[in-house]
Amino acid sequence: MNHAELRAFVTVAKEGNLTRAAERLCITQPALSLQLKKLQQSIATPLFERHPRGMHLTQAGRQLLPAAERVLTAMSEFRASAASLKGSVLGSLSLGTILDPEFLRLGACLRLLAERHPAVSFTLRHGMSGAMAADVAAGKLDVAFALGPPGLADLREQFEVLALTDFVYRVVAPPNWGGQVRGKTWRELAQLPWIGTPPESVHHRLLARVAAAEAVEFNIVAQVDLEPSMMDLVKSGVALALARDSQALRAAHADGVVIADAVVLPAELAVVCRKERYQEQTVAAAMNIVTEVWHRDSL
């Protein structure tokens, strides 16, 4: 057995669900299942029973869980002690994530953080951009990914902001709606059915800027807070929505979704922290590693 297998065991035990545990560990579900399988084979003891609502610990699993937690704690303390001898960064970090891990390059960021600063433990919380930024401001999160209009002026007023990349949102429409959206202005598109999002979403903020600039009101027929659900509604013929350029192109190719070709909404991705905390060791380490990964992979 190894550290990764024990961590997989403890995480699944706490989450009670393979999907949530895999997301928390930033690995795929098959990889997590393989780690559990290897651990159970190494001790010749089943640790979980599968149920319709998730994974339940066996009696042996319940008895071994405290020991596994003690081992992980001891290993963390050992790494922290070793790191302190060479002046490495110590501590814990809470990171707010948005969108999908692949777009954020989250796996590469966390891998480099773990390699370079093994004495830093981290927890992840996922949500909408505005909510994650608000949690940073309130001290509930140390660092978060955030989205905004180009320049990120609204974020720079309150946070230390390190810009990562710019991209565009496209208006996507159901298949066979080409005649209704191609060549159309914002004023014309606003009259069609739209999928709305909560105020914490960057979609909401970007469309609010358009509404103010064009003096129009969007015809919102549904409210959704998850990007995959929005795209499903578009594919089903319900309404228009915003989608990142890469998502829009994939959906157009795979599902026949129509992209409005006369309008785009530029946006920017950044990583943020409170200004007064930027010099803290763990915060600075996380901010710098995220920007390093993005700048390295963009070369």
Image: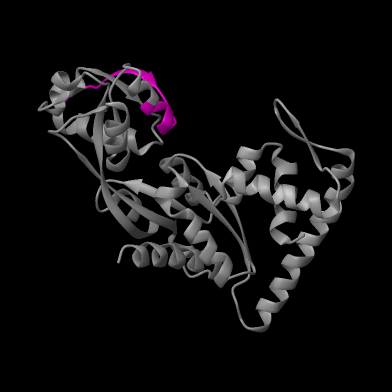
Q: Would residue 34 be found to the left or right of residue 255 on screen? A: right
Task: Return the x and y of residue 240 as percentages of the image width and height.
Answer: 28, 23
Q: Which residues are magenta?
A: 215-231
Q: Would you identify the image quadrant in which residue 236 lies?
A: top left
Res 205 visible: no
Colour setting: one colour
* Along the viewing direction, whichever of 255 and 295 lies nearer the viewer: 255
Q: Would you identify the image quadrant in which residue 213 lies?
A: top left
Residue under the point 61% across and 81% down: 87
Task: Return the x and y of residue 90 as percentages of the image width and height.
Answer: 63, 70
* Along the viewing direction, whichever of 125 and 243 lies nearer the viewer: 243
State the residue lying farthest toward the left: 183
Quadrant holding the N terminus:
bottom right
Vertically, is 135 above or below 1? above
Q: Would you identify the image quadrant in which residue 282 lies?
A: bottom right
Q: Is residue 29 magenta?
A: no
